[in-house]
Image: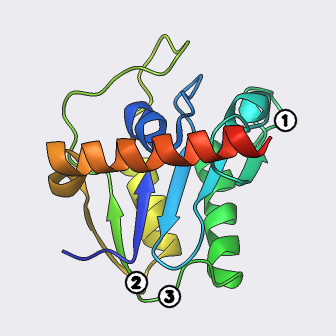
Amino acid sequence: MIWICLFLRLSENVLFTSGYFTMNGFSFIVFPKENAPVMIVPEGEKEFAEKSWVRDIRTFGWGKITDKNPCESFKGFFKDLLNEKIIKRKSKIGIESNFEPVASAHVAGELMVPAKATFDMLHSVFNESELSDAHPIASTKKVSESLYVASSKKVSETNTEQ
């Protein structure tokens, strides 16, 4: 399967590809094939996410009574990515739908794994797209090492630019 876009939310995949260790496990990194990646993180984690090599970081409120359900926030961001043409309609999108063992977030007492609510939201936003499991590619050693080397290089380049 060749994906036009890859959506990652599991803490270890976000860390591995960006260098940012999610604090609570409610962050997404989106890798469109033809555009720079976009990271979506809770407001309280922005300063940590900014230390990654990803430059387009968008935040949402989470944890306060007045904050929306995170899936509603993600839905709005993903619609923005479609409207901004960062993600094309009718794309082949890789998602994390079949990861059994997962790492916890940095300070989370509970694992926040993508489940039915996340998948329903993704399907509603990308209803013209083909969503499929990214596990076969994201979990292979060769791809994992490639992503690690690529993200390490980006982190290194970012640190020398600052």
State the separation of the CA atoms marked 1 and 3: 32 Å
> At 72% from the left edge and 51% from the top edge, which residue is drawn?
57
Number of labelled discs?
3
- Earlier residue among tags 1 and 3: 1
The residue pinned by badge 1 equals: 66
The residue pinned by badge 2 equals: 91
Q: Which is nearer the eye, 117 or 62? A: 62
Q: Which SS class for mark 3?
A: loop
Amino acid type at circle 1 is Thr
Q: Nearer the viewer, mark 2 or mark 1?
A: 2
The x and y percentages for residue 50 are: 74, 38
Residue 119 visible in image:
yes
The x and y percentages for residue 62 are: 73, 33
Amino acid type at circle 2 is Ser
Please tell me in which quadrant of the rendered image residue 46 appears.
top right
Q: Nearer the viewer, mark 1 or mark 3?
A: 3
Q: Is residue 57 above or below residue 23?
A: below
Crowding near the residue tagged with mark 3, few <14, some 14–19, many ≥20 C-alpha atoms within 10 Å:
some
The residue pinned by badge 3 equals: 89
